[in-house]
Amino acid sequence: MTDALEHVLLGGRWTASIDPRGSFRAEDPTRAAAIGPSFPVSGAADLEAAMAAATAIAAELAAAPAARIAAFLDAYAAAIDADADTLVALAHAETALPAEPRLRSVELPRASGQLRLAAAAARQYAWTDPVIDSKAGLRAHRAPLGKPVLVFGPNNFPFAFNAVAGSDFASAIAARNPVIAKAHPSHPATSQRLAQLAHQALLASGLPAAAVQMLYHFDREPGLRLAADARLGAIGFTGSRAGGLALKAAADKAGVPVYAEMSSINPVFVLPGALAERGPALAQEFFDSCVMGSGQFCTNPGIVIVPGGADGDAFVAAALRHFGEAAPRVLFSAGVQQGLQQAVATLLGAGAELLAGGRPGDGAGYRYLPTLLSVDAATFMAHAEALQTEAFGPVSLLVRAADTATLAALAARFEGNLTGTLYRAADGGDDAAWQAVAPALRARVGRLIANKMPTGVAVSPAMNHGGPYPSTGHPGFTAVGMPASIHRFTALHSYDGVPEALLPLELRDAAVAGLQRRIDGRWSDAAVGAPT
């Protein structure tokens, strides 16, 4: 059986699974048909071997020169770009996401770009945040965990969030931590090819060969045991709320921090002036955002709050035309389709009215009709928890609000989300409404957006792709944006009276080229004691 299964990347080499507990193949979502080779479902022995190998080289990797880490990340990025044709073909076959522009021109460059940004942060020590108090003899910085990081990749970004190529991976490696990558079973061949490129670049860099390992899949129970292993330094997870909370409960027993990006419905408020000014255009923008990527985005506009009155009615009518005339969208898997049906049923059971869609589409594969639901503000307020159920797909709920006071009250009822959007009039006529709604919304979202749908996530140092619970497990971290995303996989190390020669490079008296350090209360790129 093992001879017929693809090899896992374990302990620095490609090898047969030690104890496969089954096998699986990728699927073509457009046909619901298995494609490609068979991949192993790893058992406990694979997980233990990965943990032991990563733990054995953690100290060596933590001590690796920053230039070597950066060289690996840059070489890996270049290899991804050079292999674009193969990678895009694999990802398209396994996910049905458009090869162009989504995979080739948007997501793949984002993945390689993140690796290069991580390389730059590593080379410049930008993630270390050095602080020096020369009078007290204290120095502190962010440092490697000295333990492996376990990364779970999601189904919806085969490149940019892949467990062996995405932001969590790049951030953990930049901080000089070994990565055990758990690929997503929706795109195993894509993940395999990425891991092959990573492994080749790693061997060429001279870094420990076990610094990057990858398993395609493992069952829930061994996964939870792995999460509860005190040898782990941290876990990066992108996926469902149920999955993230289960991992966190297991990891808490061993004190392992979990950085989990989970559910988000990303409320969008259309203020009255914006509605009157450009309602039809906003209805089109809303529809386009909702069905982009078949709605399988963590920043999909799951709820849109629209004022009542004639302008609101016109917006709803325009949106309904778009949704009602739209063709079914292809989903990633049978599980996504089933979960979407359950979510829509929950929304309907809580009082929402179905305006369009609401069922699987005709034809082969996993398809679902773009779906629009509606509810009045009073019903939403009475059943806010159920009506905030995330529907992972081309589905959105309209909430009708009578006035600005109701808009503000609705904003206060939302759970934590990755984003919150306010559309305002260009002439400033909505500024009073903004001031009434924004404070409540601001406290409940990681990123407050003006005048655009939330689906785009720029890779920027100023990006916050995080938010209050339950969108994530902690409001103080981001999964996108260097160097802040690197901070998740670091430990704060303080040195008290340690001699100069025994300190880490960035904490010594000499300046580090290009690095701003906080020296005796002032940011400076100069040496300690230099004139200010």
Image: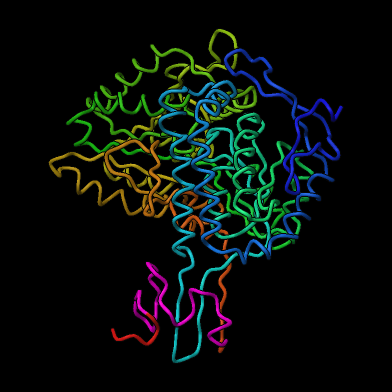
User: In what quadrant of the picture does the N terminus appear?
Assistant: top right
Q: Which quarter of the picture shows residue 20?
A: top right
Q: Is residue 408 above or below residue 513?
A: above
Q: Is residue 526 above or below residue 309?
A: below
Which residue sits at x=28%, y=24%?
315
Residue at the bottom extreme? 135
Residue 332 percent across, percent down from the top left: 58, 24
Which residue sits at x=41%, y=34%?
301
User: With 208 as the anchor, is 132 left or right in this view?
Assistant: left
Q: Is-magenta flag for residue 504? A: yes
Say whether residue 359 is visible: yes
The boundaries of the magenta stretch are 498-526
Q: Foreground residue, 14 or 38? A: 14
Residue 212 percent across, percent down from the top left: 66, 48
Residue at the top extreme? 363
Figure disc tally = 0
Q: Foreground residue, 252 or 516? A: 516
